Amino acid sequence: MLFKSRRQAGKLLTKELQRRKIRPDVVFGLARGGMVVAAEVAKILGVELRPLIVRKIGTPENPEFAVGAVAEIPKWEVYETSQTSRPGIVVWWDEKVLRQIHVSEEWKKKRVEEKEMEVLKYRNELQFSSHSNHSNHSNHFDHCLIVDDGAATGISMMAALSAAKTPLSGVAAIKTIVALPVASTEAADMLWQAADQVVILHKDPYLEAVGVYYRQFKQVSWEKVKQLLESSYGTNKKIN
């Protein structure tokens, strides 16, 4: 299966969610690329779109090979109080890979701190403090749908699931649902062990790069993420 764009993937993903009669309380998109797919899902289902920031942690020898990730579900009120707080940032490690590469606790701590600072930087990019209309939105949801544009290793989504399930995030979802246009078989198996429900349009045991499944796969800017959030708020306000 080859998708024209992230938007088209979002439309196709929504059709499958509707077929399965899945209607969440909120749609979380992994920023940045996953937000485009998630925005289509949220718009069609008529539910709130929220960002979920994830930063991968690479191995010492190969920064591109992820061994873990940090994730945060931004809470609107965080931006009313402090731009440097870290109350909702969680860490997820691939313990199987960690045992193989034998990294020190000091290395892990340093890498986590670096990635936490990146999360804070990108959180600030979204500048939620200027969106006063969001300040009364709930941070508590029963059914959370978490969407990305694809999963090769599944590490980003595992960190996202951890963020959605932990009380530290202020969400602690009762039920978590993962929705992906494409994923490797290994990632799909991993996600099924962590989520309550998983919806994947296409699984590939040999998938190494999500982008090969899209004709258009341009990098998504933080400005685009902000535009998607603003547009989603206006649409869902009318629906609800």
Image (tube, rainbow, N blue to C red):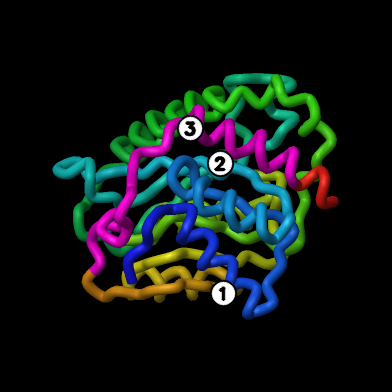
Residue 96 painted magenta: no
> Label 2's element?
strand
The quarter holding residue 88 reads top right
Residue that mark 3 sits on: 119
**Tag of residue 208:** none
Q: CA distance from mark 1 to mark 2?
A: 27 Å
Residue 16 locus on image (x, y percent) = 56, 74
Mark 2, other Cα within 10 Å: few <14 / some 14–19 / many ≥20: many
Residue 16, label in figure: 1
Contact between marks 3 and 2 (CB within 8 A): the answer is: yes
The amino acid type found where label 2 is placed reads Glu
Q: Which region is colored magenta?
A: 207-235
Sequence-wise, which precedes: disc 3 or disc 1? 1
Horizontal arrangement in the rendering, residue 104 relative to residue 130 (left or right): left
| Mark 1 residue crowding within 10 angstroms, few (<14) / some (14–19) / many (20+) | some
Which tag, 3 or 2, sits closer to the chain's start? 2
Q: Amino acid at mark 1?
A: Glu
Position of residue 236 in the picture relative to residue 126 (left or right): right
Residue shown at 56% from the left, 41% from the top: 72
Are discs 1 and 2 less than 8 Å apart at CB? no
- Residue at the spot 58% in from the left edge and 32% down from the top edge: 227
Of marks 1 and 2, the one in the foreground: 1
Task: Identify the residue position indicated by label 2 in the image.
Answer: 72
How far across and down, in percent of the image, does residue 28 sit?
60, 51
Magenta segment includes 216: yes
Q: Is residue 211 left or right of residue 127?
A: left
